[in-house]
Image (cartoon, grey):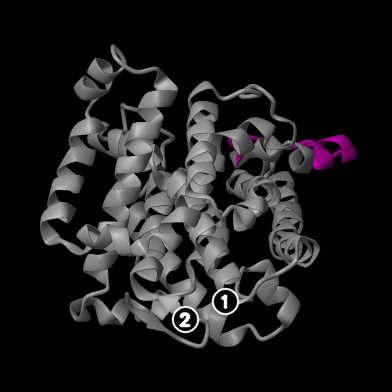
Amino acid sequence: MQEEGAMGRITFISRTQTFGVLLVVLGHCTLSNNNALITPLWWIWFTSFFCSSFDMPLFMFFSGFLFCLSQHKKKLTYGYFMLHRAYKMLVPYFVLGSIGFVIKLLLYDYALRPVAFSWSSFFDGFLYPWHNPIIYLWFLPTLLFVFGILFFLNYIKSVGVAIAVLLLLVIVTIYRPLSDVEFLNLGGIIQYLLYFALGFYFYRLQGKFAFLNSLAFFVVSGLLLLILNLYTTRDILMLWLTKNGNDLLLACVGILFSLSFGHVLSKPLFNRLKIYDGLYFCMYLLSWFIITGVKIGYQKFYYSQNTGILMVLILILTLPLLARKYIKNTFARTVLGLS
């Protein structure tokens, strides 16, 4: 296991985080909103099926992993930990969401999900995270509740109890009670508990996953993930699994592939990627502004899909670096996920 930095940052996890956030960005980078007359079908498949099959479960997995890492380094009380998490997540949620609200009011004609100039519209975007002007921010309050629910994992010492908890969460993930409840994204909270717990226990059992550092596993898991995401394979799996069961299978294979890819990216050949270690949260928070700006430009100037993707990648790989270097204000850094 490679570690670096004062906080013991784990290199392959940092590289997997960078890969994961780029996956999320590319998954949202369809300038014509999946219009098959404009966007190639292979790109619609890549964004709407391949990327989305494991990108957010991977983020929740990271969160569980880093939660266990932080508790391993320094035991924190529930109250202190939740207050700290609430500050780091709700500040960006409300500040960036408010900025997004104003932007959507000013650019009403370009908005796919326009907002109204009213307090009810404003507060609706925060009480119902999927209605937030910056829809990507749904992740923040959802993760905060997941932290609050699964903090108790710290106190489980029995292997049998841990297995029982994981099995219970598998059942919850497949049956998804409250799946239709949008208030505070209660359905989403239920959906992602398992992946957080898997990340938590992965940290504790890292020694059991040495095979992830194998090139053979990287190739095989990548091919398997590709095959499982093909339209035909998905149709066949639906004959044997429920949709939620199929989603769980794809997410787990995708997480294992991503972790294996992270090991590949941690090789000396990719040392230049070190500049992005620790920036994945900032990249995620800035991604809506970048993608939205490029989409608006597309509506005005009609550049190609490839040009738009290239613009998004350049900006997402540049702006967070500039923000980390030049933004010194502590509150601004919190808003951008830099502190």
The quarter holding residue 307 reads: bottom left
Q: Residue at x 18, y 33 (%)?
A: 227
Q: Is 140 covered by the magenta stretch?
A: no
Residue 57 as seen in the image, left or right of residue 106: left
Question: Residue 126: x and y, percent?
Answer: 76, 43
Mark 2 is on which residue type? Gly
Pick the front one: 313 or 324:
324
User: The residue tagged with tag 1: helix, strand or loop?
Assistant: helix
Asked if marks 1 and 2 touch (Cβ < 8 Å), the reply is yes
Q: Position of residue 134 (x, y in %)?
A: 64, 47
Q: Give the range drawn in magenta.
A: 111-124
Work out which residue is located at the far left of the displayed protein and give it. 216
To which quarter of the image does residue 208 belong? bottom left
Name above or below for residue 21 compared with residue 231.
below
Question: Upstream in the sequence, badge 1 or badge 2?
Answer: 2
Residue 316, x across and y down, in percent:
44, 65
* Mark 1 and mark 2: Cα distance apart in space: 9 Å
From what the image shows, is residue 197 above or below residue 36?
below
- The quadrant in which the C terminus is found is bottom right
Q: Position of residue 104 (x, y in %)?
A: 69, 46
Secondary element under disc 2, as helix, strand or loop, is loop
The amino acid at mark 1 is Lys
Could you tell whether 274 is left or right of 145 in the image? Answer: left
Reading the image, the residue beneath label 2 is 8
